Image (cartoon, rainbow, N blue to C red):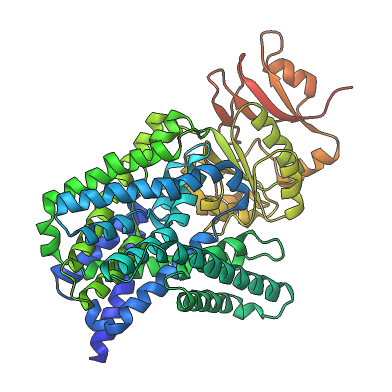
Amino acid sequence: MADSLIFELTGIIVLGLLAQWIAWRISLPAILLLLLFGVIAGPISGWLHPDAVFGGLLEPIVSLSVALILYEGGLTLKLTELPKVGRSVLSLVTVGAAITWAITAMAAIWLLQVQLSTGILIGALLIVTGPTVVTPLLRHIRPTGVVGPLLRWEGIIIDPIGALATVLVFEAIVAHQGTSVAVPVAVLKTIFIGGGLGLLAAGVLALSLRRFWIPDFLQNPISLMLVVGVFTASNALQHESGLFAVTVMGFAVANQKWVNVEHIIEFKETLGVLLISFLFVVLAARLDLDGLAALAWQGSLFVLVLILVARPLCVLVATFGASLTLRQKCFLSWMAPRGIVAAAIASVFALRLEAAGHADAQVLVSTTFMAIIGTVAVYGLTSPFVARKLGVAESDPQGILFVGAQSWVRAIALAIQREGFAVQLVDTNWDDVQTARMAGLPTYAGSILAEHTEDAVELGGIGRLVAVTPNDWVNVLAVQRLGRTFGKAGCFQIPPRQTEKQRQGHRHLHGRWLFGEGISHAKLDRKMALGYTVKVNRLSEKFDYDAFRARYGEAAVALFVISEQRRLNVLTSEEPYAPKVGDTLISLVKEVE
């Protein structure tokens, strides 16, 4: 018996992480493969039996896992994004959520022939979207403007709201325990109790780190302890308020200015991947395939209603009067995949409905998983194409992500930005980041090597990576880390301090060498110290490239060229580029007296 349990637990972990890796390799949403692996392991092969493995622990394990996932999501919410998206997010998670709820409930009642109470419960459950699906899609699409932050905020905030709505429906309608007064009272108690405990736990964690009351090796475990403790305490004081509490805690921890919490964020990301992999395999293994088959055509119509009616109407009403273009609203209307929170909440409440002898318990799970599979498949496979067609994502983005924010990098980035191209600077040096930010450059203070950085950094309009830190191996690792995002052709780095033989030996690890022969980080630093400046010259018949060289000499360093077609070309030592008349040359020069 013990050997069998170990075998099944090991299989869950192996299948979950294998699905994540394969999905990464073939650029598919991981949730599709996780569900597929879980179904194969469970109802198809009969090898995995989650209820037998976990027994009565299944519900609390699922609940705690969702709490940790939402805490990790809260850690990605940045206060600096709120002024751009605040009003629209508020409308989407209130008015929009109510519209989605109503349409989904009616569709469930009419198409799936469920009881009124079950239809309302399904409507409440499926208002959630979820960061575990939205964030990877946004990373792949890289939309421009506010739509990326807006979708990320909506996905994280709507999860605890959906959970709370589901609880209120369960108690007020299914369990026949609610009154009209109880619902607003429960909402207020959730906000004050959950929000208060979340803020308190975040303050305790930040103060403890600031005062060095926690040794380094215990910081991640104790932060995990606080999350679990806050979730449980909040639920004890107000039923199902724990998800709101952990989301608030994550948001507060990420936006406090007392201490650096990058290491905690990185740990939670790793834990989040493990939990998502584990949960989806386990929950998919519990699916009733006969129940899914019974809902085949009705379920397909139900998913179409979610995609073609509920979401567009939600966005249309919620963003009325907002400073969003029609194209942005259309893209928002085509991005509402359901994820792990919907699956987990459905599974938890199905267990409770089964215990209460409710007839529609399995319909709740089957409907939810059909919605997850349908929305993820449709949005995951079509949203990149839709984003490009609508013009909210560029098919060939020209902007630059600079890894490094030292003085000459800031000067180059400002010149490129003034020419109308997107730039983003990432650095761990807070002084350099602050100086860049004061100059009006988009920045991110943190390590480019951290897993969450790619999600946190605004990559709309960004198509190339330029790694120019003083640390050669950070540049190499940055190229490795983001090579799949930008492609090998779009990754550039300053040549390392190595012999040519050493460089060739590690050539497969490096990006393309920046600028000209013999250029190094130290040489560019020296030129800036000698009074060189970044210059923008538009080449013409009277002032062509030869005239530029004659004026500034061979010591000038050509950096970037903007063609007449407004393509930004990064100059490299491997492919010499002769700027032509009509091009705009960005270079490092010393002005002639």
Which residue occupies 52% across, 64% down?
A: 191
Determine whether, in the image, residue 272 is placed left or right of residue 215: left
In front of the other: 234 or 397 = 234
Which residue occupies 59% across, 47% down?
A: 81
List x then y, in percent, for residue 394: 46, 32
Question: Which quadrant is home to the N terminus?
Answer: bottom left
Residue 330 higher or lower than 218, as above or below: above
List x then y, in percent, for residue 405: 70, 46
Is any part of residue 408 visible from this angle? yes
List x then y, in percent, for residue 508: 49, 51
List x then y, in percent, for residue 9: 30, 79
Determine whether, in the image, residue 526 is placed left or right of residue 291: right
Extreme-right residue of the structure: 593
Number of labelled discs?
0
Residue 358 higher or lower than 475, as above or below: below
Question: Which quadrant is home to the C terminus?
Answer: top right
Q: Quadrant of residue 442?
A: top right
Which residue occupies 55% across, 52% down?
A: 456
